């Protein structure tokens, strides 16, 4: 009475088709003879027990049961029922089952079922193979972000040719019990016309790893990181990375080897440098065509990703050094990256280069990209000349037919000084309002210390015929054949008018409200300024000054009427007669100041006389424009009487003094006006006394 073997079969009991799992003849794994695989989770399993025929055909009870499961038995004649097919619960392999333990026994019974002799119980071990999933391949970027994955959990993302990635392999089990397995991963590349393992062997292997439903196995590839190749030349599919994941149950590696191919798609990348901008110290963008020497700026690069996935890049500065860091640009996105900072040099044009290339490949490497011509850009910038001209507003209106001086501050906005060695020329031009050129004057070897200013000016002649029209004066800086920083300003003009007073009439009385005014005093007008000069080793600030002299010979004398007399140095005359004038026109130095060169001043070019009968008023019809001859001003000819001014007939007896205004003396700091008072003529009587008897 014995049981010889237990066969394990898939499917429904009794359905034999030469595909049994195997045969067990004992209670251990070593007693199991492999047939066609192992039961695995989800399989339906039944068993065939072999009860050998007895030497004498007898009535027996055959009993079979699964430890922890169902059982069954039958009463049969031994020699005609040697195979017993049973399907005992659990008939389907669940996640927690790692094996079946089947027990069987044959007992000799009588016809009533009573046991006459108990048979020996035998135990059979049926192993269950673990359900292993070669679950997923993931590709992580250099930043640690997930770039792509594919497997049982779905798929998402792509990698790009030239990208550095960290392949990551995941294996899972559907079983709640721990099984031990060997795992490997084989990443392939298209090399020399065929798919080959990237480095000639498996890039991940693991032996005897415990794994269960609650404990998956995850591991990075030894290709750490891996530079994604361009596999687009392959002849059997799309551009991709094929990875072969394998697993084998450690208990029977030779018969449980399984393989799963997973493809990670590859795209071709393109990154582009689209723009270079400059940021000033205030944080705002600067106009690259309007930079100032000495400005501190930061270069900002704009990178664009023309690829359908996130791309990682390195940026490069003008000096070809790499900008610190690795930057991620989202699909079809744009980022701004600040590069180096620098001080704008004192040169008129500068070039700023930038480059962007796939991370880790190095500068100029564009072999993986779809467009290798858009990775670099050069920004050409204009740096303004630091020498600026600022017009100084004159203190008077320019008069036709006179020489004037137009002045500017030449300001140096940079620390470098300009000496004669720099050959700086300032060009001045004056135009009529219709654009006709009046004059051009240049000042060569202009000098100015760094971060300072100097006075600069030119003397020119205002033409006639302007009729109150404006003149346009322009100035610019010339260096190395190029003109910079043009400044233009409009200036008012006035004609050189001659004004006269009316001759005396036969008035008998002074105008109503007239009173003899106080005698004025001399007023010497002067101007001072400073200029830098360069003595070959340093700058010297020179202080200049000049004035219009109010002293000298400023006399009036009787010019008509024979009855005038001289009492010592004082002339006595009757009212109504004419006087002549001689007013000294000269310049004078200013104490404590150097005398300037003649290019820095003009003489007083306009003079007029005011009179006591008008209260020394300077309104038209009450003063006389003087004529300048040599170093003196005179009255202009008054008809046939000569250069005279007639005193009023009504002027009361007493002192008569003329004041002379000398103006239009131009200097770099403006126009100077001086007031000179003549000697006094004594009025006694009137012209009536010489021509009428018995004047009342």
Image: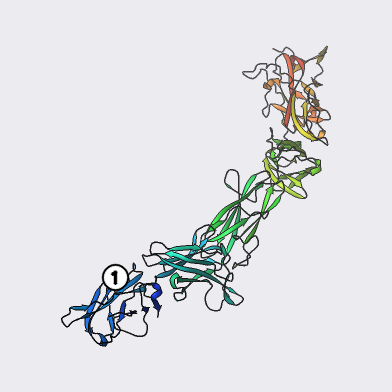
> In the figure, 570 relative to 596: above or below?
above
Q: Quadrant of residue 269?
A: bottom right
> In the figure, 289 relative to 577: above or below?
below
User: Which residue is the extreme one toward the left?
Assistant: 112
Q: Quadrant of residue 659?
A: top right
Q: Quadrant of the N terminus?
A: bottom left
> In the figure, 501 relative to 212: above or below?
above
In the rendered structure, the answer to whether residue 241 lies left or right of residue 477 reads left
Q: Is residue 514 visible?
A: yes
Q: Give the x, y percent position of residue 264.
A: 50, 69
Q: Give the x, y percent position of residue 529.
A: 74, 30
Q: Which residue is mark 1?
A: 67
56, 538: nearer the viewer: 56
313, 289: nearer the viewer: 313
Secondary structure found at label 1: loop
Q: How busy is the neighbourhood of tag 1: few (under 14 within 10 Å), some, or many (20 plus)?
A: few
């Amino acid at each position: 009475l014995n049981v010889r073997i237990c066969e394990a079969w898939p499917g429904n009991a009794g359905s034999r088709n030469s595909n049994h799992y195997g045969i067990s003849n004992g209670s251990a794994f070593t007693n199991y003879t492999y047939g066609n695989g192992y039961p695995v989770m989800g399989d339906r399993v039944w068993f065939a027990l072999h009860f050998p025929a007895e030497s004498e055909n007898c009535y027996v009870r055959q009993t079979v049961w699964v430890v922890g499961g169902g059982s069954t038995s039958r009463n049969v004649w031994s020699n005609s029922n040697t195979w017993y097919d049973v399907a005992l619960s659990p008939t389907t392999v669940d996640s927690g089952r790692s094996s079946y333990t089947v027990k069987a026994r044959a007992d000799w019974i009588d016809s009533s079922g009573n046991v006459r002799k108990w048979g020996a119980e035998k135990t059979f071990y049926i192993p269950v193979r673990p359900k292993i999933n070669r679950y997923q391949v993931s590709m992580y970027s250099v930043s640690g972000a997930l770039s792509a994955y594919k497997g049982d959990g779905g798929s998402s993302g792509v990698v790009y040719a030239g990208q550095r990635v960290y392949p990551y392999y995941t294996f899972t089990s559907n079983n709640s019990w721990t099984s031990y397995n060997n795992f490997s991963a084989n990443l392939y590349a298209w090399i020399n016309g065929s798919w080959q393992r990237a480095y000639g062997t498996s890039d991940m292997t693991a032996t005897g790893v415990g794994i269960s439903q609650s404990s998956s196995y995850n591991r990075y590839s030894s290709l750490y990181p891996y530079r994604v190749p361009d596999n687009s030349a392959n002849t059997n599919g799309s551009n991709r990375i094929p990875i072969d994941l394998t697993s084998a149950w450690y208990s029977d590696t030779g018969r449980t080897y399984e393989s799963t191919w997973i493809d990670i798609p590859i795209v071709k990348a393109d990154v582009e440098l689209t723009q270079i901008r400059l940021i000033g110290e205030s944080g705002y963008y600067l106009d690259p065509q309007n930079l100032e020497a000495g400005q501190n700026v930061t270069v900002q690069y704009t990178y664009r990703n023309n690829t359908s996935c996130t791309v990682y890049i390195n940026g490069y500065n003008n000096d070809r050094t790499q900008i610190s860091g690795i930057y991620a640009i989202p699909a079809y996105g744009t980022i701004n990256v600040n590069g180096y900072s620098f001080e704008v040099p004192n040169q008129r044009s500068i070039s700023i280069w930038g480059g962007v290339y796939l991370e880790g490949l190095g500068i100029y490497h564009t072999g993986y990209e779809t467009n290798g011509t858009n990775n670099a850009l050069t920004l050409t910038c204009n740096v303004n000349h630091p020498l600026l001209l600022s017009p100084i507003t004159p203190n008077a209106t320019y008069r036709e037919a006179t020489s004037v001086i137009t002045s500017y501050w030449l300001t140096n906005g940079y620390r470098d000084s300009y000496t004669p060695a720099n050959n700086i020329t300032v060009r001045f031009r004056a135009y009529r309002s219709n654009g006709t050129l009046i004059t051009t004057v240049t000042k060569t070897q202009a000098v100015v210390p760094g971060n300072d200013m100097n006075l600069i000016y030119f003397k020119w002649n205002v033409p006639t015929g302007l009729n109150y029209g404006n003149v346009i004066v322009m100035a610019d800086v010339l260096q190395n054949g190029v003109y910079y920083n043009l400044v233009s300003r409009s200036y008012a003009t006035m004609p050189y008018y001659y004004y006269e007073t009316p001759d005396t009439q036969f008035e008998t009385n002074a105008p109503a409200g007239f009173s003899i005014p106080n005698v004025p005093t001399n007023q010497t007008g002067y101007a001072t300024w400073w200029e830098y000069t360069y003595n070959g080793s340093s700058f010297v600030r020179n202080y200049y000054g000049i004035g219009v002299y109010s002293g000298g010979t400023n006399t009036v004398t009787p010019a008509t009427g024979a009855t005038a007399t001289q009492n010592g140095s004082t002339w006595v005359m009757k009212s109504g007669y004419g006087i002549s004038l001689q007013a000294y026109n000269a310049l004078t130095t200013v104490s404590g100041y150097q005398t300037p060169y003649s290019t820095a001043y003009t003489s007083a070019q306009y003079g007029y006389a005011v009179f006591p009968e008008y209260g020394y008023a300077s309104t038209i019809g009450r003063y006389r424009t003087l004529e300048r001859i040599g170093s003196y001003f005179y009255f202009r000819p008054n008809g046939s009487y000569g250069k005279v001014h007639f005193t009023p007939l009504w002027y009361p007896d007493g002192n008569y003094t003329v004041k002379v205004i000398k103006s239009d003396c131009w200097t770099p700091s403006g126009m100077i006006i001086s007031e000179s008072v003549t000697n006094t003529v004594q009025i006694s009587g009137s012209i009536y006394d010489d021509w009428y008897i018995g004047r009342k």
